[in-house]
Image (cartoon, rainbow, N blue to C red):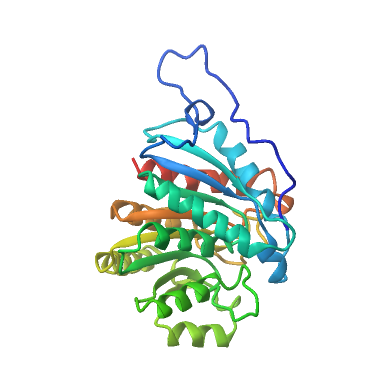
């Protein structure tokens, strides 16, 4: 499924005409992505939830990019680099693979123009499209560390790709190209993954930290140290955030809200650690489902995380 055809998003919002100091907001800062756009961050919408539908989840994430941009519009500009809006990729009927390929092409183009692509989902099937764009744009990279914040491994086996398969698809791609599959997940729930998925993750050498180990300062410090070690061994980092890693009370607008989840402040600390490495090549944020949101809370949380990543690319 895909989002209904929207006209290009119109960035608009409050203008602080009576302020005397810097008061620029995002809607005044973002510019359309073009062939001569260079550096900064390129926002790409993945207005697709066909993978969620295939996975038996609650559809609605196709509307995520629109609501996320809307939540971003009024945020203050506080040191952001150039921000370009490269529009949306949609899905015709059930043609998910074509949509992922189209996303990969746009991600690769943004990287080629010196930008960091930041994809606004959409279901977590977005990850397979983003990853393909990274490896197309940077074929010389031998070790891409995939850092995922997620309650789920998304290593499922299925006849057709869906929102539960993107990291298995990445592993198969890496195996076929003779390069390591470097995958680290924070926030995994023992109550949201079968034993088969834990066994598969262990067999593939996936590094993961459970959500209940990430409730304390000590747990986060340990996770942070492991992340720094992993990033030192890689050439580039691809960061992906599934909003269902957060507590359901903080992020209700997702396909599968978490009973426990990872505290937002601790997610932000680890995201900052990734940004500080200087190795981020692409990022995405997935599973914003406005149909189940409350007072746009999840959209606001997603906007906060998005703006944080953008500022970290300055």
Taking 244 as reference, is 137 left or right?
A: left
Q: Residue at x 71, y 40 (%)?
A: 6
| Residue 257 showing in the rendered view | no
| Residue 284 showing in the rendered view | yes
Q: Quadrant of the N terminus?
A: bottom right
Quadrant of residue 82 within the rendered picture:
top left
Taking 86 as reference, is 238 left or right?
A: left
List x then y, in percent, for residue 120: 55, 50
List x then y, in percent, for residue 49: 68, 59
Q: Nearer the viewer, residue 226 or 90?
A: 90
Q: Quadrant of the C terminus?
A: top left
Q: Residue at x 50, y 85 (%)?
A: 200
List x then y, in percent, for residue 64: 64, 49
Q: Nearer the viewer, residue 298 or 10?
A: 10
Quadrant of residue 41 within the rendered picture:
top left
List x then y, in percent, for residue 102: 56, 55
Q: Nearer the viewer, residue 168 or 97?
A: 97
């Amino acid at each position: 499924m895909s989002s209904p055809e929207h006209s290009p998003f119109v960035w608009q919002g409050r203008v602080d005409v009576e302020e005397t100091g810097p008061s620029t907001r995002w809607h005044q800062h973002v510019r359309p992505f073009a062939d001569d756009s260079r550096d900064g961050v390129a926002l790409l919408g993945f207005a697709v939830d066909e993978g969620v539908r295939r996975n038996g989840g609650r559809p609605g994430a196709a509307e995520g990019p629109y609501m996320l941009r809307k939540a971003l519009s009024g945020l203050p500009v506080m040191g952001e680099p150039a921000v370009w809006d490269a529009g949306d990729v949609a899905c015709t009927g059930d043609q998910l693979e074509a949509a992922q390929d189209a996303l990969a092409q746009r991600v690769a183009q943004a990287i080629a123009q010196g930008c960091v692509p930041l994809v606004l989902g959409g279901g977590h099937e977005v990850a397979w499209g983003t990853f393909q764009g990274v490896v197309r744009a940077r074929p010389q990279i031998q070790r891409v560390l995939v850092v995922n914040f997620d309650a789920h491994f998304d290593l499922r086996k299925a006849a057709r790709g869906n929102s539960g398969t993107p990291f298995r698809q990445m592993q198969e791609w890496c195996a076929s190209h003779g390069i390591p599959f470097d995958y680290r997940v924070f926030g995994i729930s023992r109550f949201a993954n079968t034993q088969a998925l834990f066994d598969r993750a262990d067999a593939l050498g996936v590094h993961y930290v459970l959500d209940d180990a990430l409730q304390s300062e000590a747990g986060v410090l340990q996770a942070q140290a492991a992340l720094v070690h992993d990033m030192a061994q890689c050439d580039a980092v691809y960061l992906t955030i599934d909003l269902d890693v957060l507590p359901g009370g903080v992020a209700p607008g997702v396909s599968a809200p978490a009973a426990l989840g990872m505290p937002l402040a601790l997610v932000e600390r680890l995201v900052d650690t990734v940004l500080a490495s200087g190795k981020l090549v692409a990022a995405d944020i997935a599973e914003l489902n406005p149909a189940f949101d409350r007072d746009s809370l999840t959209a606001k949380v997603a906007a906060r995380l998005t703006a944080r990543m953008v500022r970290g690319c300055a």
